[in-house]
């Protein structure tokens, strides 16, 4: 694994990890923002792709910087990662909040995107999302360990979690325990709840795959179906089970679905071609 750091104009430094060879695949994490979320899927994906992942600003090994944080800022950060590793036509995969960031990226500069995978994501925060995320934030402020425990229990199928307690322990260990970590989470939640490009989403042109899990309690399946109605040219794939963290709990199926979608894409022309 090659690791590097990209320094942004506002002073933020993003920790970047690159593994494998093949078509470029950028993985954009959800609210937690850590590249480590993808650990269970990197090895099988690196057999087919050059996998690019990173800690988002203010999280894990990346510094916060001074810029105000909204979804467009996080989208620009993701483009900066692609610039840093020399990628011009990557397949982008964003889970949960990462899928919202991908929508912004596709509206900012679709010419750099070979395809989009919106994984367990949504178009805009409806009341379900708003009430849930505000409750999560309130719990975080007073009990960060219980915040992490709640996300673990809500995000995984019970039988899977009962057989994978190291995952639970890792989530507790990564709970936003300090005031600085909690502020980063709070500003990210605020960005999620404010994001609404629903009036523009129909203009997104790169090929798209929307995926979700029928038993997702954090970003329920009806939100992915709403995406699919707004984006009728997109493919839709629903995992029968897997919870919100289905990339982790259904690794083989997840990798298979992604690989088939990638194989269906036409490569982007190189600079100066076409």
Image: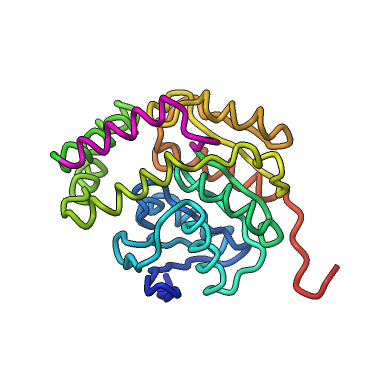
> Measured from the top left, where is residue 185 in percent x and y?
30, 49
Please, is residue 140 above or below residue 182 in the view?
Answer: above
Residue 135: in magenta span: yes
| Predominant SS of the magenta segment | helix
Can you tell which quarter of the image residue 144 is in? top left
Residue 86: in magenta span: no
Please, is residue 202 above or below residue 59 in the view?
Answer: above
Residue at point 62%, 55% (across, down) = 91
Per the rendered image, the range of residues in magenta is: 120-141
> Measured from the top left, where is residue 236 in percent x and y?
63, 32
Q: Can you say which quadrant of the picture contains the C terminus?
A: bottom right
61 relative position to 235: left or right: left
Residue at point 62%, 61% (across, down) = 90
> Measured from the top left, where is residue 165 in percent x and y?
22, 39
Residue at point 45%, 44% (across, down) = 97
Report how many numbered discs are placed on residues in the image.
0
Front residue of 5/131: it is 131
Residue at point 30%, 66% (across, down) = 61
Q: Can you say which quadrant of the picture contains the N terminus?
A: bottom left
268 relative position to 136: left or right: right
Front residue of 177/72: it is 72
Can you tell which quarter of the image residue 6 is in? bottom left
Please, is residue 205 above or below residue 123 in the view?
Answer: below
Q: Residue furthest left?
A: 142
Can you tell which quarter of the image residue 158 is in? top left
């Amino acid at each position: 694994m090659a690791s590097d750091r990209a320094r942004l104009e506002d002073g933020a430094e993003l920790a970047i990890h690159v593994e494998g060879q093949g078509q470029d695949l950028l993985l954009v994490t959800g609210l937690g923002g850590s590249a480590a979320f993808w650990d269970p899927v990197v090895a099988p994906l690196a057999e087919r792709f050059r996998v690019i992942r990173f800690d988002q600003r203010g999280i894990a090994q990346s510094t916060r910087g001074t810029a105000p944080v909204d979804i467009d800022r996080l989208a620009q950060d993701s483009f900066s990662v692609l610039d840093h590793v020399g990628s011009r036509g990557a397949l982008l995969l964003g889970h949960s909040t990462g899928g919202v960031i991908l929508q912004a990226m596709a509206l900012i500069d679709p010419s750099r995107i070979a395809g989009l995978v919106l994984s367990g994501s949504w178009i805009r925060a409806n009341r379900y999302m708003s009430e849930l995320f505000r409750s999560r934030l309130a719990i975080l402020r007073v009990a960060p360990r219980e915040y992490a425990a709640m996300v673990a229990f809500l995000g995984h199928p019970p039988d899977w979690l009962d057989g994978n307690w190291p995952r639970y322990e890792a989530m507790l260990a990564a709970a936003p325990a300090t005031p600085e970590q909690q502020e980063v989470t709070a500003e990210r939640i605020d960005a999620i709840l404010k994001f609404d490009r629903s009036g523009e989403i129909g203009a997104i042109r790169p090929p798209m795959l929307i995926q979700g899990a029928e038993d997702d309690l954090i970003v329920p399946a009806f939100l992915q179906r709403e995406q699919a109605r707004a984006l009728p040219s997109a493919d839709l794939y629903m995992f029968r089970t897997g919870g919100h963290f289905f990339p982790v709990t259904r690794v083989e199926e997840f990798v298979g679905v992604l690989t088939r979608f990638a194989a269906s894409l036409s490569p982007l022309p190189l600079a100066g071609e076409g």
